Amino acid sequence: MPPRVVILTGAGISAESGLGTFRDAGGLWADWPLADVATPEGFARNPALVHEFYNARRRNVLDSHPNAAHEALAMWEMDRAGEILIVTQNIDDLHERAGSRAVIHMHGEVLGALCAACGARWPAPERMDPADPCPACRAPATRPDVVWFGEMPYRMDAIEAALSGCELFAAIGTSGQVWPAAGFVERARAAGARCVELNLEPSAVAHRFHEVRLGPATRIVPDWAAAERGRPPQPAAG
Ligand code: APR
């Protein structure tokens, strides 16, 4: 059975947990040029800088806690197992720490490490370094297990299948500026899903949603999730 509900989350859902967003005023890309720290070319040029950036992100994640928005989505899954799939662009583990289990990390996870030489994966140490050898092949080619610009997001087949079969699609805390995630609303709409955006301000693709709710995630997500959880299955939206 495909999940009835697919929820796409972005940096905005973790903002009130103290994790920075990318494109808001003072966002991460203002201090760390994206081309330097989030592309394969940047990593090839200066792996130490890239590790420094992700080491700081990892420290920040380890110091943070899930907020009321993460918890509301986890409670939904606990209440109705199998009904909801979270597809997150976030590399933090706050959905899991809140209790969600059906989570796809389409942009990878900062708490994971990946060997660029042999593809082995293992839990990342708190600080990674360009000289770290891969525990499987010993090559000094270790990187955070995150998806950079120009790389293919993870588990796209599973995501596409879920979007094609869902009845409700919601995007929470994402600016709608990064593809393919920005196009998920179109895919879900074409499948007849009702589409709802929950964000601090309208995203770049807000006009494609049937409904837009504005406000901080910890305020608007719990009420919305509680109401949706109680709803009986709906006929397809136009
Ligand atoms: N509650 C809800 N939404 C919020 C909050 C909040 N407290 N704070 C900020 N937002 C919204 C902003 O209005 C913005 O629309 O969250 C969105 C964050 O947008 P981005 O910084 O662009 O983050 P995201 O959409 O997750 O970025 C997508 O881009 O750089 C890459 O790989 C990175 O996964 C990331 C991807």
Image (tube, helix red, strand yellow):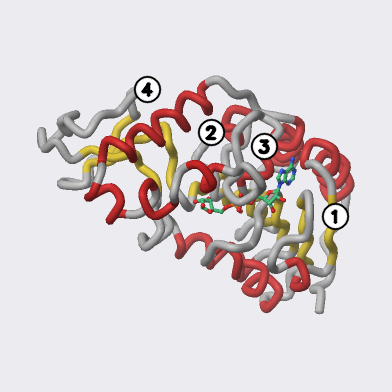
Looking at the rendered structure, the kind of residue marked 2 is Asp
Tag 4: residue type? Glu
Q: Is residue 213 above or below residue 144?
A: below
Q: Is mark 3 within 8 Å of ligand 1?
A: yes
Q: From this viewpoint, which residue is outermost toward the left?
A: 138
Q: Is residue 41 above or below residue 238?
A: above
Distance from Cα at disc 2 to Cα at disc 4: 14 Å
Which of disc 3 and disc 2 is earlier in sequence?
Answer: 3
Q: Say which of marks 3 and 1 sits in front.
A: 3
Looking at marks 3 and 1 on the same chain, the residue that comes earlier in the sequence is marked by: 3
Going from N to C along the chain, the mark reached first, 2 or 4, is: 2
Q: SS at mark 3?
A: helix
**Looking at mark 4, is its residue's CB closer than 8 Å to ligand 1?**
no
Relative vertical location of residue 176 with respect to residue 69 in this rendering, above or below: below
| Front tag of 2 and 4 | 4
Q: Which residue is mark 4?
A: 126
**Residue beneath disc 3:** 15
